[in-house]
Image (tube, coloured by chain):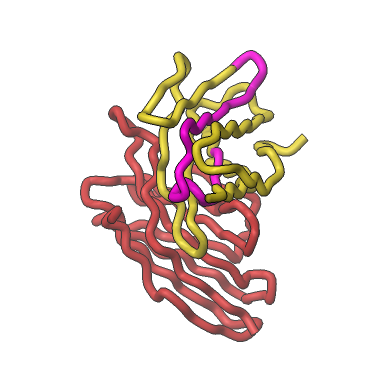
Chain colours: A red, B yellow
Amino acid sequence: ETGVTQSPTHLIKTRGQQVTLRCSSQSGHNTVSWYQQALGQGPQFIFQYYREEENGRGNFPPRFSGLQFPNYSSELNVNALELDDSALYLCASSLVSGPTAGELFFGEGSRLTVL
Amino acid sequence: RKEVEQDPGPFNVPEGATVAFNCTYSNSASQSFFWYRQDCRKEPKLLMSVYSSGNEDGRFTAQLNRASQYISLLIRDSKLSDSATYLCVVRDDKIIFGKGTRLHILP
């Protein structure tokens, strides 16, 4: 296994609510990225954090926000949930340098259903 | 043009056959390239990085053509366990996944 853990694994929210998803990165990895994967689609890049700062962002609105903590774990927060936010949310950890730089190691994901 | 495009699937291939996937990307400044596989309702897992000179790992060969902006993955002597969705990934200041190509290996 990758050593990347995510919580919760499943959750159900209603439209307009807020959600926080959590991710612990693989030991030694200093970079965390988040993805949204709808059924039948590839993962869509939300953003990446390195040394507690966001250093890359995909085409997601500001109601998608995140944090990275000194231990490199991370949170994804989504405000004002919409029905289309229902998806699998994946977290991946990686390194920025070295022979394995850029290789992503994923957690099992958090499946969010918005009703 | 989409940032990353993959062959539409699914591919239904008999066991033992050779399968080839292609993936094109739009940003010529893209820096690194990868292939991942994803089993149904599971997370993506790294299959291999793609190096400029091409690289091989057992039955799998990956190639990069920067001039034409595409990467490829060849699977030789396909096994039933190769059935999965194959995703190409291109990195610049973002991390972009293709939609994936579903592969079914038939017994």
- Residue sitting at 59 percent across and 23 percent down? B29
Quadrant (top left, top right, bottom left, bottom right) of the N terminus of chain B = top right
Q: Is residue B15 left or right of residue A4?
A: right
Name, please, the residue furthest toward the left.
A27
Residue lying farthest right? B1
Q: Residue B17: x, y in percent? A: 54, 35
Front residue of this view, candidates B29 and A37: A37
Q: How many marks?
A: 0
Residue B10 visible to an observer of this rendering: yes
Q: Is residue A111 magenta?
A: no
Q: Residue at the far front: name it.
A: B107
Q: Which residue lies at the image location 30% right of the left edge and 55% below the top edge?
A: A25
Instruction: Give me the residue at 41% from left, 34% from top.
Output: B48
Against B13, residue B69 (above or below) is: above
Task: Give the magenta-colored segment's residue range.
Answer: B66-88
Spot occupied by residue A104 in the image (x, y as percentages of width and height): 40, 44
Comparing B47 with A62, the one in front is B47
A63 versus B55 height, above or below: below
Residue B70's spot in the image, x, y percent? 62, 25
Magenta stretch containing residue B67, yes or no? Answer: yes
Q: In this view, does A37 lie to the left or right of B26?
A: left
Residue sitting nearer the eye, B98 or B94: B98
- For the point 58% across and 42% down, which residue is it? B96
On the image, the x and y values in percent for residue A59 come to 65, 51
Can residue A54 be seen here? Answer: no
